[in-house]
Amino acid sequence: MSSTAIMWFRNDLRLHDNPALIAALEHEQVIPLYIHAPEEAEPYAPGEASCWWLKQSLESLETALQEKFNLTLQIRSGSSLAAIQNLIDLHDVESVYWNRRYEPALRRVDENIKKMLNADGLQVKSFNGSLIFEPWEIENQQGDPYRVFTPFYKRAVQMPSLPLQQLPDRQVTTFVQVGSKNLTIADLFLTSTFRWYNKFEGQWAIGEDAAHDRLMEFVNDDISIYKDKRDRLADHATSRLSAHLHFGEISPRQILHVTQQYKHDQNERNDGAIEAFERQLFWRDFGHHLLYHYPQTQDDVFNQKYTNFPWQHDDELLQKWQRGETGIPLVDAGMRELWATGSMHNRARMIVASFLTKNLGLHWLDGARWFWNTLVDADLANNTLGWQWSAGCGADASPYYRIFNPVTQGQRFDANGDYIRRWLPELAHLPNKIIHAPWQASTNDRPSDKSDTLSPDYPEPIVDLAESRKLALERYGAWKDNA
Ligand code: FAD
């Protein structure tokens, strides 16, 4: 096909299994484009940890496009429509391709751009580049969206998924010289020197190749133990693919392709381990299904019964939680892991979220916003799902009376205290018996110097777990009955 196409990259920063890119490469000339327009995503412009990841992901994509196709990634900032129209005017573009986004604000942007470009006679095509199934492809027998995960999952696994999209074999020699308007990735000021996230450096390998290496390492070393060990806080038994998935460095279909092949090679000798992992990818699809069909849930409760529920705002308590200074070791370890790495173990996420919304009685959005800024995998669909689940107001949520006890959770999923010792060195000297609840230590457990406190640098609990649990049950219980 002759003529020129724009390939607009967004959260699909990869070459392979990228349906929009593959369609664009049918054209003789291709302009690969990235537009930095955080204001268009408001109120969910990417957080600081996300921008740290994005910068490196863009650098990786830029190099890959250059090496594979001799294409220069065009970088723009400001209005997406204006940037695209400018390229169209200058280069006689005929078609524009992208993979879909599902965040409410970004959907509105895309719909508007499509309308405007269509009105100008441009061909605009969008594709599914980041989910197993589009949110509207899965519906219940009444033709409605699902609100509960298990039936959603049972339906989804019966459906045939799209085959992987192959990059064309031919060397694409097309290149449009787009001139001097191009910005560099550095011009986007995605990161600054003196910020906390700079310590993530060296902890993550970023980009399409790194995502595939991570997947293969996980499949070869850990997938067989995933089912048994995924909840163990100190073990690295999960895939750590979430940020790669969020930025589209790898697609869920590519992951399923590899896990299915592995299952085949294993002759089913995996005791459900692979399904346990694959199921999580469908939770990700479910989060997007909900956000697509119920866009208001990005900042409003899914379960209307909880409208006006009296979650509090308290800056002092919130700050102690954010800094990992609550005096509850498991909560503090999770929050410090987040601060030090840009990520947190899934079980710890559930525990710190339950603690914030139930024991402290703070608003789930205050917790969600902190995660949004500090997680490298911050994802509006998954974060909303996780926070509303934890607060008890989401679709298919944790029941209101389920309040995680950080002490028993720690004894069960971090029996040797390794997770606590890793993130709270000031408690490293404590014996396993008391490491999850130092305040319960008897006099026999105290150090021989008879000092009053077991760890002078570690705070006392900011709430009594039993008392705050009781209050939360009363609060939720009364609301349930009144609502
Ligand atoms: P694995 O266990 O290896 O799972 C594989 C993939 O499945 C993950 O990479 C992820 O894409 C998906 N997945 C796993 N668990 C879930 C889940 N519970 N819901 C939806 N998808 C899931 N995940 C995010 O990607 N971004 C977020 O912003 C986010 N915020 C969360 C907030 C809270 C309060 C909670 C409880 C969970 C949140 N999660 C979020 C879900 C989950 O914690 C992470 O996806 C997971 O810890 C990432 O680690 P992993 O890649 O090793 O996961």
Image (cartoon, helix red, strand yellow):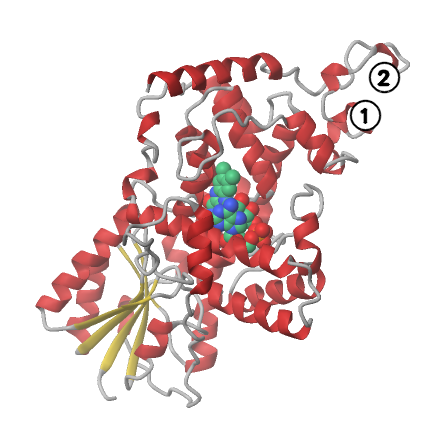
In the picture provided, is 362 more to the left or to the right than 20? right
Which element is circle 2 on? helix
- Read off the residue under disc 1: 433
Mark 1 closeness class: few <14, some 14–19, many ≥20 residues within 10 Å: some
- Read off the residue under disc 2: 445
Quadrant in the picture for residue 54: bottom left
Mark 2 closeness class: few <14, some 14–19, many ≥20 residues within 10 Å: some
Is residue 242 in view from this perspective? no
Quick check: marks 1 and 2 in contact, CB under 8 Å? yes
Relative to residue 414, is residue 447 depicted above or below? above
Q: Residue at x 28, y 46 (%)?
A: 39
Kind of residue sitting beneath label 2: Asp
Looking at this rendering, what residue extends furthest in the front direction? 141
Ligand 1 within 8 Å of disc 1? The answer is no
The foreground one among 35 and 327 is 327
Q: Residue at x 37, y 54 (%)?
A: 188
Gap between marks 1 and 2 measured at Cα: 9 Å
